[in-house]
Image (cartoon, grey):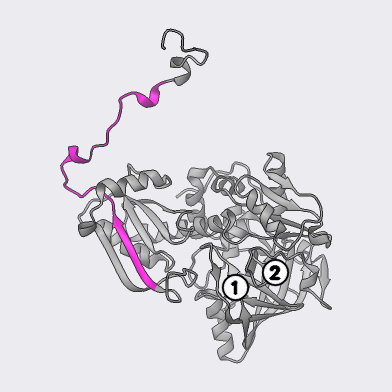
């Protein structure tokens, strides 16, 4: 696969904000918007139409930004590719990561603070009605494998539990594996939380990669050059040098505390429970930093999870099923749970194997629909038409009970539930005319401007 062609890359957060402003897609709120629900409410009202900047948020002097990647076209634009090439660009970056380059002077360390109420210095909003308090929602949590030293980057929800303490939900992924290894030896795990970074870093953080692959190398490949990183002051962790804010701390061994509820991507609340704790040791940031927040359940939240998963799920499926053409995680399925697969099927039963392969590709996937190449997988009406006309439940339904799913799906028992697949493809060997779609010859070529009289009245008709 060739590397994507650059159109108009926005390498850093400030470049992207400037581009959105130039193109009329950045709304700037009046100074002093409230941290308690007001910022989230305004961002939600503009969700998908404009990003938002909130100067002097909460009266604390810093600016909060939100909605930066709340449209699939914007995500492509930020990477310098067109919409059709977005998944391919991510596939290429995941397959061809670029090692980062370390620098000794970094904008993210222009200001260093180690004393006092560290988290109170930041304009951290409270989003949804029943959230347990203020949350850092766009923080890239970076940790190192204590056995190999290789980093992992992910976004975890982070509850402000005190002036220097965060509660964190760790799902069964790489960060939790790193911490379990450290805790087994009686050690804390160093972490860094990066708030305010490039579109490439944000998207790369959501890649589904093997455990010892650093997502910052994928970010460099998305950008097209090795990412500049800086070593944290108190640990060996490397963070994006151009980031706005870095919170340095430690995941505490043998310490748990209440965290939640919090409004999550399924648009329900994640429940309160005893969860892991981060002790905050220091704060570093740019002069006049920007604080990025992602409103729980909004388009930015859903799309950031969907796109990278599509790319890595497509790679996984195509490695076993060359006939798989494309995949799409639907917004109706909260960008995680509902997958549509476009397949050129050559053998009976292949669609069912693809369904099972999709379940194995990521445990979040709950429902899979497999369709033919003539179905637009990004058009819900087209997919529903395929199910209505090509699917029979007694023949084409796959149900897997007692499977691991998302712990944030409230219909499961702590992630234990069922999965369902629908084979909505034309059966191989079916009579050709039975499934021939109707079409009007020449319809696409008609020039409506030439055949419609826009100024005509009803004289002579009625």
- Image coordinates for residue 201, horizontal then vertical, percent: 62, 59
* Residue highlighted by disc 2: 134
List x then y, in percent, for residue 192: 68, 73
Q: CB of mark 1 within 8 Å of CB of mark 2?
A: no
Mark 1–mark 2 distance (CA, rounded to whole Å)? 11 Å
Across and down, in percent, residue 270 comes to 55, 71
Tell me which residue sits at (47%, 61%) in the image. Answer: 336
How packed is label 2: few (under 14 Cα within 10 Å), some, or many (20 or more)? Answer: many
Residue that extends furthest to the front in the rendered view of this protein: 462
Dividing the picture into quarters, in which one does residue 339 lie? bottom left
- What residue is at 57 percent from the left and 68 percent from the top? 214
Q: Is residue 156 visible?
A: no
The foreground one among 58 and 164 is: 58
Q: Find out whether residue 2 is within the magenta segment.
A: no
Looking at this view, name the residue that lies furthest to the bottom: 186
Is residue 211 visible to us here? yes
- Tell me which residue sits at (54%, 78%) in the image: 176
Image side of residue 33 versus residue 438, left or right: right
Q: How many marks?
A: 2
Assign a secondary structure to mark 1.
loop
- Per the rendering, the mark at residue 172 is none
Reading the image, the residue beneath label 1 is 261
Residue closer to the observer: 355 or 323: 355
Near mark 1 (Cα within 10 A), the count class, few <14, some 14-19 or many ≥20, is: some
**Residue 433 horizontal side relative to residue 155, left or right:** left
**Does residue 132 lie above or below 92 as drawn?**
below
Labels 1 and 2: the sequence-earlier one: 2
Q: Which residues are magenta?
A: 417-446
Horizontal and vertical percent position of residue 276: 61, 81
Secondary structure type for disc 2: loop
Q: Residue furthest top?
A: 460
User: Relative to the observer, which residue lies in front, 127 or 14?
Assistant: 127
């Amino acid at each position: 696969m060739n590397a994507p062609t650059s159109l108009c890359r926005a390498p850093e957060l400030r470049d992207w904000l400037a581009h959105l402003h130039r193109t009329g897609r950045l709304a700037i709120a009046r100074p002093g918007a409230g941290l308690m629900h007001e910022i989230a409410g305004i961002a939600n009202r503009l969700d998908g139409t404009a990003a938002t900047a909130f100067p002097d948020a909460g009266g604390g002097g810093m600016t909060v930004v939100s909605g930066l990647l709340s449209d699939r076209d914007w995500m492509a634009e930020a990477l310098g590719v067109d919409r059709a090439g977005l998944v391919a660009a991510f596939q290429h970056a995941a397959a061809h990561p670029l090692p980062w380059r370390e620098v000794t002077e970094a904008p993210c360390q222009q200001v260093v603070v180690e004393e006092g109420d560290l988290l109170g210095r930041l304009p951290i909003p409270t989003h949804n009605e029943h959230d347990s308090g203020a949350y850092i929602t766009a923080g890239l949590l970076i940790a190192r494998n204590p056995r190999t030293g290789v980093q992992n980057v992910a976004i975890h929800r982070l509850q402000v539990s005190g002036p220097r303490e965060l509660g964190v939900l760790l799902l069964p992924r790489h960060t939790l594996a790193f911490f379990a290894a450290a805790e087994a030896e009686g050690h804390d795990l160093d972490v860094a939380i990066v708030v305010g970074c490039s579109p490439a870093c944000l998207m790369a953080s959501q890649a589904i990669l093997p455990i010892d692959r650093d997502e910052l190398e994928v970010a460099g490949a998305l950008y097209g050059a090795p990412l500049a990183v800086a070593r944290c002051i108190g640990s060996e962790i490397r963070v994006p040098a151009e980031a706005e804010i870095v919170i340095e701390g430690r995941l505490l061994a043998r310490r748990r505390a209440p965290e939640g509820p919090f409004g999550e991507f399924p648009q329900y609340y994640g429940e309160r429970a005893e969860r892991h704790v981060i002790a905050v040791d220091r704060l570093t940031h740019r002069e006049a930093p920007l604080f990025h927040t992602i409103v729980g359940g909004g388009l930015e939240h859903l799309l950031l999870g969907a796109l990278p998963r599509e790319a890595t799920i497509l790679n996984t499926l195509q490695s076993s099923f060359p006939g798989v053409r494309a995949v799409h995680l639907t917004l109706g399925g909260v960008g995680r749970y509902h997958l549509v697969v476009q397949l050129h099927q050559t053998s009976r039963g292949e669609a069912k194997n693809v369904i099972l392969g999709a379940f194995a590709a990521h445990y979040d996937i709950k429902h899979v629909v497999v369709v033919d190449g003539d179905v637009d997988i990004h058009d819900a009406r087209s997919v529903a038409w395929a199910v209505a006309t090509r699917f029979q439940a007694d023949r084409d339904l796959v149900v897997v009970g007692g499977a691991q799913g998302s712990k944030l799906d409230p219909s499961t028992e702590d992630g234990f539930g069922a999965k369902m697949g629908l084979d909505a493809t034309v059966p191989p060997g079916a009579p050709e005319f039975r499934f021939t779609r109707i079409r009007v010859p020449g319809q696409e070529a008609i020039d409506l401007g030439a055949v419609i009289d826009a100024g005509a009245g009803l004289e002579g008709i009625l």
